[in-house]
Image: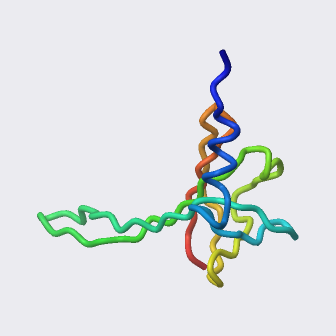
Amino acid sequence: MALPFADDLAAILNVDEFATAVTYDGGTINGVFDNETIPVETGGGIQIHQQQPRLTCRTSDIPSLAEDQQMVINSVTYDVKAWVHDGTGVTTIQLERV
């Protein structure tokens, strides 16, 4: 029996649910944006906190993804820095605010 992953993903990437619209490569895709603040060790026992913006979306929505392409999310421009395809049709993209 097949798992209803495609249906679940469609619900998650719905802008009326969890997703946000993202301007990318001349069009719009939907993705779940997360801008977690994480502690970063700077040496000497001192930590600073740094934002770690990332977008999770369908791999099929970003077939020509490349480093330093830009995405606009919530009126903020980000550069693409790295990404991981998880093998299920979902990709997580690490971003850097421009």
Q: Position of residue 92 (x, y in %)?
A: 59, 50
Residue 91 in picture, x, y percent from top left: 64, 46
Residue at point 87%, 70% (across, down):
26
User: Who is closer to the viewer here, 2 or 96?
Assistant: 2
Task: Give 53 or 16, whichever is nearer the viewer.
Answer: 16
Quarter of the rendering occupied by the N terminus: top right
Relative to residue 62, is residue 54 drawn left or right? left
Q: Report x, y in % for residue 67.
A: 69, 58
Q: The C terminus lies in which quarter of the figure?
A: bottom right
Q: Is residue 11 above or below residue 69?
A: above
Please give the name of the residue rendered at 61% of the width and 49% of the height, measured from the top-left corner. 83
Q: Quadrant of residue 31?
A: bottom right
Front residue of 32/94: it is 32
The residue depicted at 44 percent of the width and 65 percent of the height is: 52
| Res. 94 image quadrant | bottom right
Q: Is residue 53 left or right of residue 77?
A: left
